[in-house]
């Protein structure tokens, strides 16, 4: 994230925002902390630049993220979908398909701004601000806010910090850079409370979501010399997952790659996680999804029993490639 690159992109962003009166801000379906925090932070920044932001999301807001300032302003019902807006800003969404049915609200030719940190983002916007080296999309928004001298109050600091702490798994994953810590330090000085945010995000699960963990762990299967792990859960309508469910098998010493399978509406949603040089993003692409080297995912219209052996074989090949 070279300062001159940030400056160029930040200035283009400001120029685009100023040209539009009403901007629809959205993010990816099955949103995580970085997704919701980036959506709300971007909306605040648009207001600070003098334009109007309408927050819209296909699907509900996970209950552990409702504490985020401004979350009540996110429209999640297509019955109340905004009709009049001049441009769209998608944050943390690696492809336009990832915003789900929100894409259907976009008129042909309508300007799209794309701010993201996924290396596989195909630059689907008219303005694309992509920095794969950023730990989170909120890290990019933070750099933009600082460059443009936007006032970062406690609420904005809380949002930007939350994206950082969730996408780095509490500053533990390989994307945890000195620059991410510098941003976190700056945001803490501006009012973000690391303890309160960590409590809200990582320690406010519902009892049923923790019971889902026991359900998943009860069928944990470790194979390929203790290097690959899988587990599965039935997704029940209205029941939420703990933020880090997919990552649990990586806590077993020796496990370098894992997959979590969920049955949902006759389809299977898969989350892949890996350690170090073992990359799972190419596997996710093979199955029509995407993501980061150590955290990726996809959905297929197949039963878990059919897709599971194919995923294990793909993980096995990737592990062999990376370790020999
Ligand atoms: P999760 O497993 O937490 O849903 O997602 C992990 C990472 O993979 C995130 O960066 C997420 O955006 C990405 N990802 C998950 N599912 C898909 C998908 O179906 N398509 C694409 N392109 N990315 C996905
Ligand atoms: Mn992200």
Image (cartoon, rainbow, N blue to C red):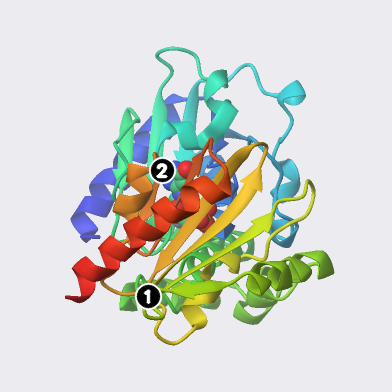
Q: Which of 270 and 46 is in front in this view?
A: 270
The residue carrying mark 2 is 289
**Mark 2 or 1: the one toward you:** 1
Does 205 sit above or below residue 33? below
The reply, left or right, for residue 155 in relation to residue 285 is right
> Mark 1 or mark 2, which is nearer the start of the sequence?
1
> Badge 2 local density, few (<14 within 10 Å), some, or many (20+)?
many
Report the residue at 19% width, 55% height from top: 4
Residue 157's x, y, as percent?
56, 65
* Ligand 1 is within 8 Å of the C-beta of the residue at disc 2: yes
Report the residue at 35% width, 58% height from top: 313
Residue 315's x, y, as percent?
35, 61
The reply, left or right, for residue 12 in relation to residue 67 is left
Quarter of the figure that contains the C terminus? bottom left
Q: Residue furthest right?
A: 207
The residue carrying mark 1 is 256
Q: Which residue lies furthest to the bottom in this view?
A: 253
Residue 286's x, y, as percent?
33, 43
3D distance between C-alphas at marks 2 and 1: 20 Å
Residue 30's x, y, as percent?
60, 47
Q: Nearer the viewer, residue 267 or 7?
A: 267
């Amino acid at each position: 994230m070279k300062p001159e690159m940030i400056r160029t992109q930040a200035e283009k962003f400001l120029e685009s925002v100023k040209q539009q009166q009403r901007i629809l801000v959205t993010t990816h379906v099955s949103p995580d902390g970085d997704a919701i925090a980036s959506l709300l932070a971007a909306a605040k920044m648009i207001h600070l630049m003098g334009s109007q932001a309408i927050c819209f999301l296909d699907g509900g807001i996970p209950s552990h993220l409702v504490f985020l300032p401004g979350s009540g302003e996110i429209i999640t019902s297509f019955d109340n979908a905004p009709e009049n807006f001049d441009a769209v800003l998608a944050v943390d969404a690696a492809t336009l398909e990832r915003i789900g049915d929100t894409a259907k609200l976009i008129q042909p030719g309508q300007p799209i701004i794309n701010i993201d940190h996924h290396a596989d983002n195909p630059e689907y916007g008219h303005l694309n601000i992509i920095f794969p080296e950023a730990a989170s999309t909120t890290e990019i928004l933070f750099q933009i806010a600082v460059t443009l001298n936007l006032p970062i109050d406690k609420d904005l600091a809380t949002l930007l910090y939350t994206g950082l702490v969730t996408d780095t798994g509490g500053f533990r994953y390989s994307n945890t850079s000195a620059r991410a810590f510098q941003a976190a330090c700056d945001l803490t000085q501006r009012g973000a409370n690391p303890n309160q945010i960590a409590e809200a995000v990582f320690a406010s699960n519902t009892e049923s979501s923790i019971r889902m963990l026991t359900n998943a762990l009860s069928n944990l299967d470790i194979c390929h010399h203790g290097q690959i792990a899988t587990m599965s859960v039935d997704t029940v309508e209205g029941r939420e997952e703990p933020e880090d469910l997919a990552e649990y098998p990586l806590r077993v010493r020796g496990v370098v790659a894992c997959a979590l399978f969920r049955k949902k509406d006759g389809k299977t949603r898969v989350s892949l996680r890996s350690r170090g040089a073992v990359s799972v993003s190419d596997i996710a692409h093979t199955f029509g999804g995407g993501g980061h080297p150590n955290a990726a995912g996809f959905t297929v219209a197949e039963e878990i029993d059919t897709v599971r052996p194919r995923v294990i074989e793909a993980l096995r090949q990737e592990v062999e490639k990376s370790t020999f």
